[in-house]
Amino acid sequence: MSKQYETVIGLEVHVELATRTKIFCSCSTQFGGAPNTHTCPVCTGMPGSLPVLNRQVVEYALAVGLATNCQINQYCKFDRKNYFYPDNPQNYQISQLYLPICHDGWLEIETESGGSKKVGIHEIHMEEDAGKLIHDEWEDCSLVDYNRSGVPLIEIVSEPDMRNAAEVIAYLEKLRLIIQYLGASDCKLQEGSMRADVNLSVRELGAPEFGTRTEVKNLNSFKAIARAIEGERKRQIELLEEGRAVVQETRRWDDNKESSKAMR
């Protein structure tokens, strides 16, 4: 008799906020524009430049937190998340690692069976977006556009409470509806103003412990998210059936090939 498996899914949803200016400077957040024209010494990480927090970012984050039944921290702070990557000009991202503005919330979704289910929200924190790398295959080089660097984000981190793609899409649709109603973001996946990373693991049905999870990135539509969940679920089950271990890693989804590959 073949084993039965359960899929365990949690999401990290990044939402670009609908402010006119960036989180720590007065540069425009408008989508598009010629490369590196919506920039200044602050959002390009020049030495000696000082960030000043955009009040509207805090108000939008609070509104989304209250609408998703979160507890609000009366005291919160920003931290430096250090990593080197060409699209990150300071070599750190200003985020909220330890004291996020919102925590311990939930959303209620409708399930396929017609019932309802609560999906826990671990936290919502504010942070700045990175720039964008453009890979030029003709010239065999990579170019960087810092227009997006410093655009304000909230990251909404769910608990691992979802069990299939239908629940994930129901959660994302409910979240998008709330955020759009509040006017906090337009949540256009095709423009990157709403992006979801899928943390997924599988375990034998009834097992008390979670399996080893992977994080799947590069998902820019609900259909791509559903296909990535199914593809990664099948890949992990095949590994377990062959007696091999699932490696904890970040994977990039290629929607054209309907497959993922390891990033880091």
Image (spheres, grey):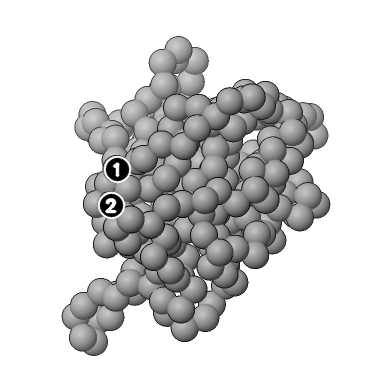
Is residue 7 shown above or below 131?
Answer: above
Which quadrant of the view contains residue 215? top left
Q: Who's the residue at 47% across and 58% down the image?
A: 150
Describe residue 48's horizontal placement relative to residue 25 as left or right. Answer: left
Label 2: how many Cα within 10 Å (few below 14, some 14–19, many 20+): some
Q: Secondary structure at mark 1?
A: strand
Q: Nearer the viewer, residue 142 or 43?
A: 43
Query: Residue 86 location in percent, x, y?
Result: 27, 62
User: Splitting the image into 4 quarters, where does residue 100 fall?
Assistant: top right
Vertical comparison of 159 with 222: above or below: above
Residue identified by numbered label 1? 82
User: Residue 40, image x and y in percent?
Assistant: 43, 69
Labelled disc at residue 122: none
Disc 2 marks a residue whose amino acid type is Asn
**As drawn, which residue projects farthest toward the bottom?**
138
Residue 206: x and y in percent read 49, 15
Residue 144 point in image, percent of width and height? 33, 72
CB under 8 Å between discs 2 and 1: yes
* Residue lying furthest top: 208
Point 41% across, 76% down: residue? 36
Tell me the SS state at disc 2: loop
Three-letter code for the amino acid on which mark 1 is drawn: Asn
How many numbered markers are drawn? 2
- Residue assigned mark 2: 91
